[in-house]
Image (spheres, grey):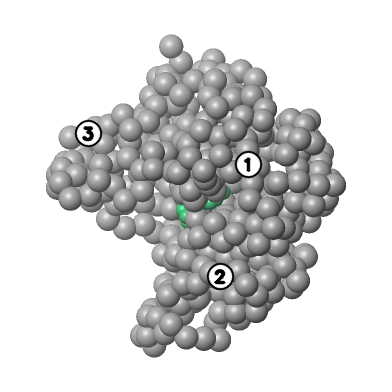
């Protein structure tokens, strides 16, 4: 397999130098920096189907998918056409349009227990607003979140540091007011007894437990048997809301989201990423009673100039329309499973300990001997090896997330040829990082 070198990313290097002068770290989202893997960010010229093309003319099989949204493949002709048509009729009205109700109907139809949604423009906005609504409905201030779960850069949710059960949060970011961090209680993922203990002592002040039903921001960590069911039980016992943050998993692991793969009914759910198909669209929703507490029906305020804008709606509607077609998630799931299996075999042959797994169009890999069940386990993975693997794969035309703490995604546009390319590149790359 031919490999690329940094000399073949000359234009990226130039653009990065320019960007660093006026953009903080040269990026607009820290995850795009290559801090965790070394090297410099690769600048994208265009993306098409399963591929990303950089500004130097190199092509990569994309396993990031814009961090999730690109579920039907990049620049899908039907999505592009719908966006172009919508754009020609006006980019934003700041007023009601038909497509908003259409997208809301699709979500409400897809997810049991959700009667109404509010459309917003980012996952962060969705979780922030869902938390506000939970606080409004319960009259309580605190929130319980799990170590290693990411819910966007909301002040009270930007807390993940510390270890052990019942750690009162230390801010993970500078600038988060201490009082906000203190309103966040942390528990280890998949540790129901820790949650039960916390709730036994703080339950009456906790508005909500927020959880990624599959954790995708500390690698790929699935819920243990009974974990989500247990959270539901504990929330019911203490009168707290259960919030599913399905910004990543929603319409990604199954039609609707992980809600439809488990038997647990959250009080509020957040979506993002896939539901906009690449445009800034997100949502949160729940029962009619809960959502009616939101302005203009109720006392909880939340608003957005660009919320429900017609271009985002067009992109989301066509993307979800494709996702809804018969067999879509079976085919997508088979691809992710094939890739996870292929990576596993390649690693074993190279003598590299690797854990893989997949659900629907989401999959993960961890350089670990033992299963990864929580943030502690995720931190113990061999991240230095991941960094070397990342570079080896990049040089063989595979676009991975630049951190070992991320999940990965396939799209409907990934075919056998692209998957075989990834596995072939992985065989060589595992060998190169084996020692
Ligand atoms: C990406 C993500 C968010 C934040 O969404 P943004 O659109 O980046 O604000 C929140 N929660 C989860 C689980 C995510 O993966």
**Residue 221 image position (x, y, % from top left):** 63, 36
> Do callouts 2 and 3 mark residues in contact (Cβ within 8 Å)?
no
Disc 1 on helix, strand or loop?
Answer: strand
Q: Which residue is mark 1?
A: 145
Residue at x 59% of width, y 43% of height = 183
Please say if 71 is above or below 339.
below
Front disc: 2 or 3: 2
Identify residue for label 3.
Answer: 6
Neighbour tally class for label 2: few under 14, some 14-19, many 20 plus, Cα within 10 Å: some
Looking at the image, residue 62 sits to the left or right of residue 286; the answer is left
Residue in front for this viewpoint, 335 or 168: 168
Q: x and y percent of residue 35 in the render? A: 33, 33
Q: Is residue 355 above or below residue 127?
A: above
Mark 2 / mark 3, whichever is N-terminal = 3
Residue sticking out furthest to the top: 435
Between the C-alphas of marks 1 and 2, the distance is 23 Å
Q: Which image quadrant is residue 285 in?
A: bottom right
* Mark 1 CB within 8 Å of ligand 1: no
- The residue that label 2 is drawn on is 301
Q: Nearer the viewer, residue 225 or 434?
A: 225
Q: Split into 4 quadrants, where in the image is the N terminus?
A: top left
Q: Helix, strand or loop at disc 2?
A: loop
Q: Nearer the viewer, residue 103 or 174?
A: 174
> Which residue shows up at 28% across the image and 41% down it?
41
Quadrant assignment, res 5: top left
Residue 2 visible somewhere in the drawing: no
């Amino acid at each position: 397999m031919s490999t690329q070198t940094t000399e073949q990313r000359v234009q990226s290097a130039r653009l990065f130098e320019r960007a660093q002068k006026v953009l903080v770290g040269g990026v607009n989202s820290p995850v795009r920096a290559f801090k965790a893997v070394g090297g410099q960010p690769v600048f994208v010229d265009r993306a098409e189907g399963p591929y990303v093309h950089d500004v130097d003319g190199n092509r990569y099989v994309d396993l990031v998918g814009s961090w999730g949204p690109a579920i039907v493949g990049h620049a899908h002709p039907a999505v592009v056409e719908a966006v172009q048509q919508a754009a020609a009729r006006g980019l934003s009205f700041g007023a009601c349009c038909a497509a908003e109700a259409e997208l809301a109907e699709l979500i409400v139809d897809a997810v049991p227990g959700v009667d109404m949604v509010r459309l917003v423009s980012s996952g962060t906005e969705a979780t922030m607003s869902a938390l506000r609504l939970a606080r409004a409905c319960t009259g309580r201030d605190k929130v319980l979140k799990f170590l290693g779960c990411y819910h966007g850069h909301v002040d009270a949710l930007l807390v993940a540091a510390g270890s052990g059960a019942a750690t009162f949060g230390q801010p993970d970011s500078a600038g988060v007011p201490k009082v906000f961090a203190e309103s966040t209680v942390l528990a280890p993922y998949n540790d129901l007894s820790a949650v039960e203990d916390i709730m036994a002592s703080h339950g009456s002040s906790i508005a909500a437990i927020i959880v990624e039903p599959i954790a995708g921001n500390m690698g790929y960590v699935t819920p243990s048997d009974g974990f989500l069911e247990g959270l539901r039980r504990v929330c019911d016992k203490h009168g707290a809301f259960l919030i599913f943050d399905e910004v990543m998993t929603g319409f990604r692991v199954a039609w609707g989201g992980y809600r439809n793969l488990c038997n647990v009914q959250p009080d509020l759910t957040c979506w993002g990423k896939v539901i906009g198909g690449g445009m800034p669209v997100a949502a949160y929703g729940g029962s009619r009673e809960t959502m009616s507490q939101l302005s203009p029906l109720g006392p909880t305020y939340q608003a957005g100039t660009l919320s429900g804008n017609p271009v985002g709606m067009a992109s989301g509607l066509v993307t979800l329309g494709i996702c809804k077609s018969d067999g879509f998630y079976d085919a997508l799931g088979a691809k992710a499973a094939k890739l996870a299996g292929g990576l596993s075999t390649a690693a074993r042959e190279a003598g590299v300990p690797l854990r893989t797994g997949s659900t629907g169009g989401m999959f993960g890999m961890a350089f670990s001997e033992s299963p990864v069940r929580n943030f502690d386990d995720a931190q113990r993975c061999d991240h230095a090896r991941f960094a070397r693997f990342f570079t080896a794969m990049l040089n063989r035309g595979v676009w991975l997330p630049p951190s070992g703490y991320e999940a990965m995604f396939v799209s409907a546009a990934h075919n056998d040829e692209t998957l075989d390319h990834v596995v072939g590149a992985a065989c060589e790359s595992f060998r190169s990082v084996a020692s």
